[in-house]
Image (cartoon, rainbow, N blue to C red):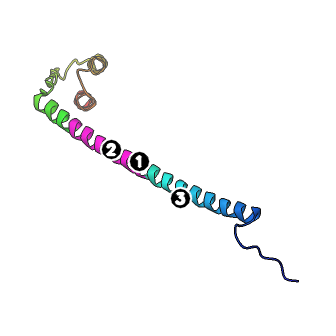
């Protein structure tokens, strides 16, 4: 015998199935809408951060340019002149110690110290 079909309203199972489909569709649409909204807000936030970084870079560049414009060059200390001692009767060790002290005091750099030492030892 074929199943009996009722005409009219759906039964309890049909109503539950229809409600589940409607609720699932609404949930999917709401989730997609919320995702799109979140992505749009994220993009706008990233764009705002990018613009702020660009503006800060321009401000920094202008500040560096202004500082460079008003910066005074550092005075250059004249290189100390090492007096040439007479060839006869030079105490080489004492002269090397003096050169070492001048270098330690910061009055001679490495190149000047090496040149004076080479001159003294030659």
Residue drawn at (12%, 26%), measured in percent from left and top? Answer: 72
The local secondary structure at tag 1 comes to helix
Q: Name the residue under label 2.
A: 48
Q: Name the residue under label 3.
A: 29
Instruction: Find out whether residue 17 is within the magenta segment.
Output: no
**Marks 3 and 2, how far apart at CA:** 29 Å
Image: 89 above or below 70: above
Q: Which residue lies furthest to the front in this view?
A: 8
Q: Which of 22 and 7 is in front in this view?
A: 7
**Marks 1 and 2, how far apart at CA:** 10 Å
**Is residue 107 rendered to the left or right of residue 42?**
left
Quadrant including the N terminus:
bottom right
The local secondary structure at tag 2 comes to helix
The answer to which image quadrant residue 121 occupies is top left
**Is residue 96 rendered to the left or right of residue 81?**
right
**Marks 3 and 1, how far apart at CA:** 18 Å
Residue drawn at (82%, 77%), measured in percent from left and top? Answer: 4
Q: Nearer the viewer, residue 91 or 68?
A: 68
What range is drawn magenta here? Answer: 40-60
The answer to which image quadrant residue 64 occupies is top left
Q: Main secondary structure of the magenta part?
A: helix
The image position of residue 34, as x and y in percent, is: 50, 51
**Is residue 61 rendered to the left or right of residue 34?**
left
Q: Name the residue under label 1.
A: 41
Of badges 3 and 1, the one in the foreground is 3
The image position of residue 101, as x and y in percent, is: 29, 17
Q: Which of marks 1 and 2 is nearer the N terminus?
A: 1
Q: Residue furthest right?
A: 1
């Amino acid at each position: 015998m074929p199943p009996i079909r009722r005409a009219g309203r759906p039964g309890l199972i049909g109503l539950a199935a229809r409600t589940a489909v409607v609720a699932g569709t609404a949930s999917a649409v709401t989730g997609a809408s919320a995702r799109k909204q979140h992505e749009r807000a994220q993009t706008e936030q990233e764009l705002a951060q990018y613009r702020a970084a660009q503006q800060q870079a321009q401000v920094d560049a202008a500040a560096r340019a202004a500082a460079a414009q008003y910066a005074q060059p550092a005075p250059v200390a004249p290189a100390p002149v090492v007096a040439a001692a007479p060839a006869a009767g030079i105490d080489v060790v004492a002269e090397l110690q003096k050169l070492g002290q001048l270098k330690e005091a910061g009055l001679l750099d490495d190149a000047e110290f090496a040149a004076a030492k080479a001159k003294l030892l030659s």
